[in-house]
Image (cartoon, rainbow, N blue to C red):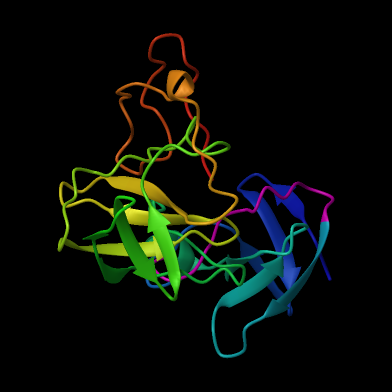
Amino acid sequence: MAKIRSDAEGLYAQIGGYKMRPGAVGGHAHARRMDDGGLRPGDTVKARHIGGSPLGVLTLPDGTKTHWHVDDESRRRNLVSPARDNVFDKEGLRVFDRNVTVRRDEVGLRVELDGTIYRPGAVEGFGEGHRMDDGRLRPQDLVPASPVPGTPLLRVCVPDGTKTFWHAEGPARVPMPADEVPGELDWETDGRTLRSPVDGLAPGRSI
């Protein structure tokens, strides 16, 4: 177990005999979650040092994991801005995109990944705060996509560099009433939040 503490530089914890801190570090952040996980001074979490590396892995209260780096000159020299649109699994490892082919059936556009069918369209519980349109994709388009862990969503990378989210087919996919579907909103490129309030709507939430 490790107790979260704070000093003039921010949060830290003693893990496996090393003082470690959160923050995206080049050479690691491209593949691992490295944020503070919402932890605060005084919190106690399960943590361990990853042998042979400068990293420690912390298990957060929600069961997910994040990685902190040894507080040394290498960390300070290689701190980078975290990529906003990276997706991580429960273990704190990045979920990399895989190419999927857009197809059309009697219902409409669809893609299939690992046996699950995903479709565009605003869905209750997600459509209010996530871009969920078809991205102007067409049948036979080949696009990168990745499941969002812990949700029924698939993040689809549109050729113009933006992201949209398609929902898994099934009973939980309940379309939003037409009069509640947001209009043309100015989404951030990650497809998860709004750049600014539009028509009185609050900025969308992130997942």
- In the displayed structure image, the side of residue 135 where residue 133 appears, left or right: right
Report whether residue 84 is seen. Answer: no
Above or below, 177 against 81 in this view is above
> What span is in magenta?
29-43
Q: Where does the image place residue 14, in percent across and percent down from the top left?
A: 74, 68
Residue under the image location 33 percent in, 24 percent down = 185
Above or below, 132 against 150 in this view is above
Instruction: Out of 207 and 30, give the one closest to the viewer.
Output: 207
Residue under the image location 38 percent in, 72 percent down = 27
Most extreme residue toward the front is: 106
Please say whether residue 33 is one of the residues in the magenta stretch. Answer: yes
Q: Where does the image place residue 120, in percent across and percent down from the top left?
A: 36, 46
Above or below, 200 against 109 in this view is above
Residue under the image location 39 percent in, 51 percent down = 85
The number of discs equals 0
Instruction: Out of 179 and 199, give the one closest to the viewer.
Output: 179
Q: Quadrant of residue 145?
A: bottom left
Q: Where does the image place residue 174, in percent across and percent down from the top left?
A: 54, 41
- In the displayed structure image, the side of residue 47 where residue 95 appears, left or right: left
Residue under the image location 49 percent in, 37 percent down = 175
- Prevalent SS, magenta region: loop
Report whether residue 58 is seen. Answer: yes
Most extreme residue toward the bottom is: 52
Q: Where does the image place residue 151, in percent across and percent down from the top left?
A: 57, 55
Instruction: Out of 191 and 119, give the one closest to the viewer.
Output: 119
Instruction: Out of 132 and 6, give the one closest to the viewer.
Output: 132
Which quarter of the rendering shows the N terminus?
A: bottom right
Please say whether residue 145 is one of the residues in the magenta stretch. Answer: no
Above or below, 82 against 59 in this view is above
